[in-house]
Image (cartoon, rainbow, N blue to C red):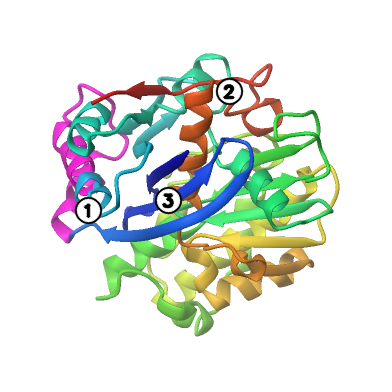
């Protein structure tokens, strides 16, 4: 089927949408893609809603998310199915659950096609982490690219998450096929600091980090966080480790950004110790792959080959939107979306719901 997937990540930069032709198992073809940034006003509404739950004044945020998605997704030819992740505002898998804002029913009416959504709730209800949720698609990408040995896919969005895949396994939900977890903060603290102190939206080209000096004491303090020692799978909220946001006070902007970049890289490097075997190669997706300073830190601290996913013919800007197109197809077919190795659920678990126009 032809599926249009959309994703709005923890970086709060905007909405990605991409077409995938798939049966929910293999990848037949990649279709067109597009991006719609949030306006400053829209981003302010979403930032104000971070950490909030349904019924806690999030209606305006849900409206912003839905209208932005509808604006972008209407630009595409009509697909067979749409996949709508929504905007994560709060994530507490051991507490109140997980909250992705947005109106799937309204989106289905506006697009005139069925919309798969609510991908994470069943996983959390079954005792899973509810994240990361792209690992099954990473497995399909490894198969599509003809990879024949264990490989790490690293997404550097607001939060970092890593998937270890063995493409020789029978399928993504087979024992030992995938292990996934959030590594730690990635772009979120850097972006917030840069926006607060400069006229930039992020550290463009890694220039600020390249000009700064890393405070290794802060890096070591972060590496001692209990979360990093917990076995995978495990997940984080964008606002976890709030003390990192405060470490820049009284420091040069360049030094603060360099230290936060080093924290992100060191967390990934330490996280590799959780993998069943050490991958020889790490393929990086998300906005962080465009930061050469961060990529160099990753290669240095991880001591393995670090490359953008474009090295195997993928689009690192659209991989998560494509992932939710892939997962939407799996929802339609009743296939598992997560497994013990990806979120910690007790068994491979279907999930998601479909709204029809």
Instruction: Give me the residue at 32% from left, 60% from top.
Output: 35
The tag earlier along the polypeptide, 2 or 1, is 1
C-alpha gap between disc 2 and disc 3: 28 Å
Q: Which residue is mark 3?
A: 19
Q: Nearer the viewer, residue 101 or 6?
A: 6
Q: Is residue 177 above or below residue 217?
A: above
Residue 48 located within the stretch drawn in magenta: yes
In the figure, residue 114 lies in which quadrant?
Answer: top left
Observer able to see residue 214: no
Pointer 1: residues within 10 angstroms few (<14), some, or many (20+)? some
Q: Does residue 330 appear to the left or right of 13 in the view shown?
A: right
Q: Does residue 87 appear to the left or right of 140 in the view shown?
A: left
C-alpha gap between disc 2 and disc 1: 30 Å
The tag earlier along the polypeptide, 3 or 1, is 3
Q: Give the magenta-colored segment's residue range.
A: 40-68
> Horizontal and vertical percent for residue 206?
48, 78
Q: Does residue 113 appear to the left or right of 320 in the view shown?
A: left
Q: Is residue 355 above or below residue 29?
A: above
Q: Which residue is mark 2?
A: 128
In the figure, residue 34 lies in which quadrant?
Answer: bottom left
Instruction: Give me the residue at 50% from left, 46% from top.
Output: 21
Q: Nearer the viewer, residue 79 or 67?
A: 79
> Horizontal and vertical percent for residue 262?
59, 66
> Horizontal and vertical percent for residue 256?
46, 70
Observer able to see residue 55: yes
Q: Which residue is mark 1?
A: 43
Tell me if label 2 and label 3 are in contact, CB under 8 Å: no
Residue 156 located within the stretch drawn in magenta: no
Q: Is residue 352 above or below residue 247?
A: above
The tag earlier along the polypeptide, 2 or 3, is 3
Instruction: Give me the residue at 66% from left, 21% from top.
Output: 348
């Amino acid at each position: 089927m032809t599926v249009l997937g959309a994703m709005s990540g923890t970086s709060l930069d905007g909405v990605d949408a991409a077409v995938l032709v798939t049966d929910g198992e293999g990848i037949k073809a990649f279709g067109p893609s597009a991006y719609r940034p949030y306006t400053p006003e829209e981003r302010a509404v979403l930032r104000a809603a971070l950490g909030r739950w349904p019924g806690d004044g999030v209606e305006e945020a849900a409206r912003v998310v839905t209208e932005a998605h509808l604006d972008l997704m209407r630009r595409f030819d009509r697909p067979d199915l749409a996949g709508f992740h929504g905007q994560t505002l709060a994530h507490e898998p051991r507490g109140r659950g997980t909250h992705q804002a947005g109106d799937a029913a309204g989106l289905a009416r506006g697009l005139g096609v069925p919309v798969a959504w609510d991908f994470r709730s069943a996983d959390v209800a079954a005792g899973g982490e509810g994240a990361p949720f792209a690992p099954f698609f990473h497995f399909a990408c490894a198969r599509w690219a003809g990879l024949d040995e264990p490989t790490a896919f690293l997404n550097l969005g607001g939060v970092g998450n890593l998937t270890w895949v063995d493409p020789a396994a029978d399928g993504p939900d087979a024992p030992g096929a995938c292990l996934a977890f959030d590594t730690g903060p990635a772009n979120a603290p850097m972006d917030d600091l840069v926006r607060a102190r400069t006229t930039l939206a992020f550290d463009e080209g890694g220039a600020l980090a390249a000009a700064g000096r890393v405070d290794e004491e802060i890096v070591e303090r972060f590496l001692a966080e209990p979360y990093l020692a917990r076995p995978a799978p495990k997940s984080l909220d964008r606002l976890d480790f709030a003390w990192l946001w405060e470490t820049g006070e009284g420091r040069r902007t360049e030094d603060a950004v360099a230290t936060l970049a080093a924290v992100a890289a060191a967390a990934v490097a330490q996280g590799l110790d959780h993998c069943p075997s050490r991958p020889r190669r790490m393929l990086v997706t998300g906005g962080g792959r465009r930061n050469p300073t961060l990529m160099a830190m990753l290669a240095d601290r991880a001591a393995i080959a670090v490359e953008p996913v474009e090295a195997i013919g993928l689009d690192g800007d659209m991989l998560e939107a494509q992932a939710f197109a892939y997962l939407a197809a799996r929802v339609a077919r009743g296939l598992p979306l997560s497994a013990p190795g990806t979120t910690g659920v007790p068994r491979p678990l279907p999930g998601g719901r479909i709204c029809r126009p």
